[in-house]
Amino acid sequence: MGGQRLLLAVAGCLMCTWGLRAATLDLTSISGPAVVEQLLHLATFSDDPLPAVTRLIFTPNDMKARKYVKQLMKEAGLTIREDPMGNIYGRMHGSTKTTGAVVTGSHVDAIPLAGAYDGTLGVIGAIAALKALGEAGFRPEKPIEALMFTSEEPTRFGLGCIGSRGMSGALTVETLNDKLDVNGTSFQAASTAAGYGGKSHETILEGTRVKPGSIAAFVELHIEQGPRLEREGLQLGIVSAIAAPAALRVFFSGDGGHAGALLMPDRNDAGLAAAELALAVEKATLDAGAIDAVGTTGFLQIGPNSMNSVPREAKLEIDIRDIDAARRDRTVSSVLKSVEEIAARRDVRHRVEMINQDPPATCSQEVITAATEAAKELGASQKALVSRAYHDSLFMSQIAPTGMIFIPCRNGWSHRPDEFASAADIETGVKALALTLARLAGTAAAGEHSEL
Amino acid sequence: MGGQRLLLAVAGCLMCTWGLRAATLDLTSISGPAVVEQLLHLATFSDDPLPAVTRLIFTPNDMKARKYVKQLMKEAGLTIREDPMGNIYGRMHGSTKTTGAVVTGSHVDAIPLAGAYDGTLGVIGAIAALKALGEAGFRPEKPIEALMFTSEEPTRFGLGCIGSRGMSGALTVETLNDKLDVNGTSFQAASTAAGYGGKSHETILEGTRVKPGSIAAFVELHIEQGPRLEREGLQLGIVSAIAAPAALRVFFSGDGGHAGALLMPDRNDAGLAAAELALAVEKATLDAGAIDAVGTTGFLQIGPNSMNSVPREAKLEIDIRDIDAARRDRTVSSVLKSVEEIAARRDVRHRVEMINQDPPATCSQEVITAATEAAKELGASQKALVSRAYHDSLFMSQIAPTGMIFIPCRNGWSHRPDEFASAADIETGVKALALTLARLAGTAAAGEHSEL
């Protein structure tokens, strides 16, 4: 009889610990409508009338948004800290002091006339996930942090993902020195006026850069900004890779002339050079032989742009993206080669400016697995997919195992006031995030106290 | 002795009439510097400060210019009449009443920031030529008229050569009804306010249209607006043909999309359709296989014209010129076919607007011969050449044997304030014009009185 009791007790303990680990955490405190209410409240801090959201870094509406985010973090029981660039962290302490934190976050700033879900879902949803984990009695081994990046949109300073670039070390003092807003205000001046900042861009970046090992994993919850999940009736997308753009600006110039008087053999038409280059961009992209390779001549301007004038100058802006860095850079090289060849053949002068060439990212298998299992646990339909827009996750992937979880958005629309995600999909996404974080952070052993 | 005297008398009479016909008319009254002085005085009637000349039809400076032109016509002893569109004629009467007049003229209106010689040379020079013929005692068989077209430049009403179009019948009431200036003023209102005009565009055109047979020949003296005569050190160009443009506007539209998210197979990029069409215009032009064929995509605009947006729409303006109407129209057809083919292949919507398609002109052999002999008589160097810009002569050629005489202009520059022709070249041109007119008008038989 004693042997049977012992067996039961052991089984009970095992079941108990196993249960605490594998039993579905009680995430019923996560309410889609409640999260939507918070998102819509956040959206009221906008320079434009709702439903349009315009919120640029360090403007008054952005300061109100930050205040609201910190209030929610406090209500979730998180310990708040902010860095000199203005990234805001809310920490749920773990039982260990020595490992990096599991971090989840996104941004709340918005380009002019945007919607209420892009970025904000990953901040409000992160806080809601951590709050629910706490209320469910979950005690993580590693600390978990909700993070609001200071700015993801390039609108004010002409550089996207400025916060995650700073954190990952992908931002140099030289680059930050060049980034002035339309009024000529520097990041240092603007951040300092907002209560962040510091003496110089150097000290600001130093205080922002993440110490190696302090982030164990990074997860970002985001609307898909594409139509695939909705079309296929799926609730979640587990991102496998994040495409990154290489962007370049090309100038051609010739001698122009009168459209009637200048004979064909005497021309060096900059517009035709541009036409050839736009088609070469398409060809180089298709020659990459991969569905994930995209290339676009989105901007093309010729001058003087008058019907009876042979074009004298042309300016193009070209965007080339892929999930494979080497393949994307081969496409860029091919385009650069075409610039030279076309310029020589057309006898026009040429100039190229590389605008950026960020490396694409492959998501971490650990994060992908955790998110996939979270989806299974929820019974949510999901598929793996590529993120074709880039996010702060692109830069975080340089310093930590990173992954993203997508939810569908209506028609795939984003960057417009009628951007929309349903309360049901939002609830699924936040719950999936919470379960993913729990898996990544691990459960504290029974009896261990949270580190402080 | 009586027989000898008779013979001498007859010989004398014959020599006398032959002499009056073939002896170099005494054109020493034609002074290059004097004509230049008149051109520079005319140039002072300008909306912009000299040397820039801006003078739009029926504006106050244009009215001053008209007054000056009529004053010069009067001083030249010409009989003045004006038609409802504002074309101004100064007639030197001939000995016959029943044949058409030999007419010579050009325009004095000027596009913004133009020079002092474009068009004006052919008006001031025409009056100077007729004055000199009168002072040389020349009595024409056919009447000779100096003509100032009411407007050649398209600036105010969006239609070039409006006066010669009206005279030749190439202008319909419907077209004129559509031509409003930037303030919405109609031609009827503006011309009537200027002292011309009439009840309606119909009555205005009726009163302007030239009666068949009333113009025996038309000659226009003009600066070359090209560099060939100057480069080859020639004093005169005898125009053999006048190129004419066909102009069309093409619109493509697709669905656009996000440069990162929209995969290549799913695109219908309007910018790439435009790029293909611009290159097709070049190819169709070169395929015409003639040096005189020119084709230009001078205007190209894509939208939204943003680097991370797949172009959703494109607008092109295409200018195709040739001296051979059938060949030019074959080039236009080829381009139209390319529009259809490209639109189908790229899966974009398309729309074409023909802006104009005026027939080119071959100059009259009679006028060419008269001008060539005039040049020989002057001992002036000359060559035959094509006019690549079009002029009022293009429309006059539809109703009368027509020719043009070019003089060199510095660097071929025109439509700019530093446009320049030398006094020496101007003198040669006006003298050549006078001799050409004399040949075309024929000499009145001795004893015949000028018709009134």
Image (cartoon, coloured by chain):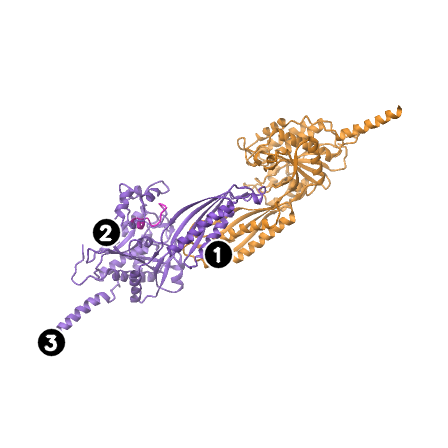
Chain colours: A orange, B purple
Residue count near mark 3 (Cα–Cα under 10 Å), binned few <14, some 14–19, many ≥20: few
- Viewer-proximal residue, A426 or A357? A426
Same chain letter for marks 2 and 3: yes
Residue at point 56%, 56% (across, down): A340
Q: How many numbered tags mark residues here? A: 3
User: Is residue A424 part of the magenta span, yes or no?
Assistant: no
Q: Which x, y percent locates residue B118?
A: 35, 54
Viewport quadrant of the N terminus of chain A: top right
Mark 1, residue position: A268
Magenta residues span B156-166
Mark 1: secondary structure: loop
User: Is residue B162 part of the magenta span, yes or no?
Assistant: yes
- Viewer-proximal residue, A347 or B317? B317
In space, the residues marked 1 and 2 are separated at their CA atoms by 49 Å
- Viewer-proximal residue, A325 or A306? A325
Mark 3, residue position: B1
Same chain letter for marks 1 and 3: no
Q: Is residue B69 above or below residue A423?
A: below
For residue B276, the mark is none
Mark 2, residue position: B80
Mark 3: secondary structure: loop
Q: Along the horizontal axis of the image, is B27 left or right of A326?
A: left
